[in-house]
Image: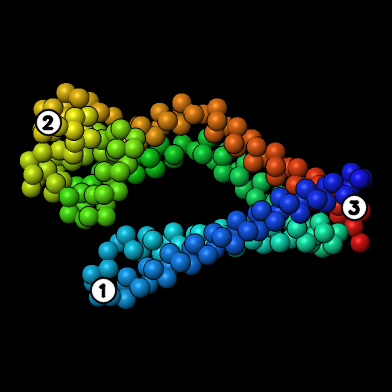
Amino acid sequence: MSCKVILKILMVIVNSAIFFAGAGTVIIGVLVEVKRKQAVGKLDDKDIPPQLVHLAKAAYSLIAVGSILTIIGFLGCCGAMLENKCMLMTFFIIILVMFIVEVAAVAILLSSPQVRAVVEKLRKAVAKSIEDSYGEDETITKAWDQMMKLMECCGYNNYTDFTESKFVEKKSQYPQACCSDKNATCDEDKAESKKVIGCFDAVVQWVKKNSASIAGVAFSIVAIEIAAMIVSLILYKNGD
């Protein structure tokens, strides 16, 4: 079996997987949007919670990403099988553009002085959301409870995010996650003494702890993209 045939088989297998992954992502996005519209249809415009608006954005994002993956997989798979130069060159250009965008995005994030300002604004916005919605909105409350349980954290910054919240106002206590104690009542003094870190810092610590694995995945993605570009050029050179 020649090297060219092996490259074609690898391109077909990899891009078939990309195609089906993209198609699956599109289907999930469509189902999410259908369910969202069914929920919205039962409510008046003024009663539509903001979470359903955000859900629409998530659904459209899934559809967009899935569509791109489907196109890439189709072009790569069919281009390799048929050795079609047009498809292979289009595939190469899309992968190249994605690679450049990824590199540019990383460079901007690492060098931009505005990143800290954005993070600070996010801190304030999320803290405000906790004050207004935790204990009032069941969806947000459950989401935060699951997040705090999973990451063993309290609030976005720390327990003070809940101080002015409706939850504390009504129950005169803090979420149990803020005290790391499932049995005792979590009051302000206990929450302060336990010093449970905020979820933002918990995520940062997790990223630092798993930085080697994350870097490995990132380099693997880059390596796959570069390999895909090289193989597509080789097949393009020998295509019809």
Tell me the CA gap for discs 2 and 3.
71 Å
Instruction: Name, please, the residue furthest toward the top.
Output: 193
Neighbor class of circle 3 (other Cα within 10 Å; few <14, some 14-19, many 20+) is: few
Amino acid type shown at disc 2: Ala
Q: Name the residue that disc number 3 marks.
A: 237
Tell me the CA gap for discs 2 and 1.
40 Å
140 relative to 37, above or below:
above
Q: x, y percentage for residue 34?
A: 42, 71
Query: Residue visible at 16% across and 27% down?
Result: 192
Q: Say whether disc 2 or disc 1 marks the residue closer to the N-terminus.
A: 1
Q: Secondary structure at mark 1?
A: loop
Q: Name the residue that disc number 2 marks.
A: 184
In the image, taking residue 95 as reference, residue 134 lies left or right, namely left
* Numbered circle sitting on residue 43: 1
Please tell me which residue lies in front, 175 or 198: 175
Viewer-side label of 2, 1: 2
Q: x, y percentage for residue 221?
A: 64, 41
Amino acid type shown at disc 3: Lys
Query: Residue visible at 11% across and 43% down?
Result: 168
Q: Secondary structure at mark 3?
A: helix
Amino acid type shown at disc 1: Leu
